[in-house]
Amino acid sequence: MLKKEVVRDGKGKIVGSVTSGYSGSYESVVRDENGHLLGTTSSRFGTTRDANGSLVSNNTSDPGLLIRRK
């Protein structure tokens, strides 16, 4: 089952979203406040990748690494 979480800044503004529950090579999809893809995370492989598929982290599956990137 897919689960979507909205990410807000300290002032309540939406800065992104994380949709989890996918099966396969990634478990979560991270999007910005406009719905554009920022990247994916995989707890299975312990990786975080940007929208181009480039490795952002090879030891953590943290969506926050993608939301904070600007």
Image (cartoon, rainbow, N blue to C red):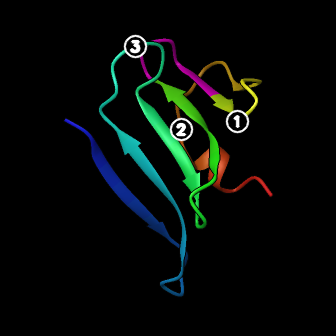
Tag on residue 24?
A: 3
Label 3 to label 2, Cα distance in Å?
Answer: 17 Å
Say if mark 3 contacts mark 1, CB within 8 Å.
no
**Considering the numbered disc 2 on the image, is that residue within a helix, a strand or a loop?**
loop
Q: Residue at x 33, y 19 (%)?
A: 23
16 shown above or below 62: below
Q: Would you name the residue on which mark 2 appears?
A: 62
User: Image quadrant for the N terminus?
Assistant: top left
The magenta stretch spans residue 21: no
Q: CA distance from mark 3 to mark 1?
A: 17 Å
Compared with 12, 64 (above or below) is: above
Amino acid type indicated by mark 3: Gly
Q: Amino acid at mark 2?
A: Asp
Identify the amino acid type marked 1. Ala
Disc 2 packing (10 Å; few <14; some 14–19; many ≥20): many
Q: Residues within 10 Å of mark 3 (few under 14, many from 20)?
A: few
Q: Give whichever of discs 2 and 1 has the lower sequence position.
A: 1
The dot on residue 4 is none
Q: Residue furthest front?
A: 35
**Residues in magenta?**
43-48
At horizontal 44% and vertical 35% (from top left) the residue drawn is 28
Tag of residue 51: 1
The residue at the point 53 percent across, 38 percent down is 62
Q: Is residue 36 above or below residue 63?
A: below
